[in-house]
Image: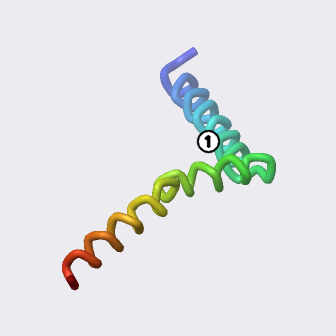
Amino acid sequence: MDIGTLRGLGTALVLVAFVGLLIWAFSGRRKKGFDEAANLPFADEPKSEKREEKASGSKHE
């Protein structure tokens, strides 16, 4: 087996892994988990709104 064949097999392996990753990422079964993960930065937003209201209320007084 020469180096060209090994490189070709390596490229084919990476292509298969990439296609598998795409199928996993865009699978309908993963949507709920990804939506929950996408909303994690906003999980504590109501607390920060209360802080802003208190801070703005004290500035106006």
Residue 45 % position (x, y)? 46, 61
| Other-residue count near label 1 (Cα within 10 Å), few / some / many at <14 / 14–19 / ≥20 | few
Return the residue nearer the eye: 19 or 55.
Answer: 55
Return the residue nearer the eye: 6 or 20.
Answer: 20
- The outermost residue toward the right is 29
Q: Residue at label 1?
A: 18
Q: Quadrant of the N terminus?
A: top right
Residue 14 % position (x, y)? 58, 35
- The outermost residue toward the top is 1
* Model colouring: rainbow
Query: Measuring 39% from the left and 62% from the top, which residue is drawn there?
Result: 48
Query: Measuring 80% from the left and 47% from the top, which residue is drawn there?
Result: 29
Q: How many marks?
A: 1
Q: Is residue 13 above or below residue 19?
A: above
Q: Quadrant of the C terminus?
A: bottom left
Residue 40 % position (x, y)? 53, 51
Quadrant in the rendering for residue 24:
top right
Query: Measuring 52% from the left and 18% from the top, which residue is drawn there?
Result: 2
- The outermost residue toward the bottom is 60
Q: Is residue 29 above or below residue 10?
A: below
Q: Amino acid at mark 1?
A: Phe
Q: Is residue 50 above or below residue 34?
A: below
Query: Measuring 40% from the left and 66% from the top, which residue is drawn there?
Result: 50
Q: Secondary structure at mark 1?
A: helix
4 horizontally vs 22: left or right: left
Residue 5 % position (x, y)? 57, 25
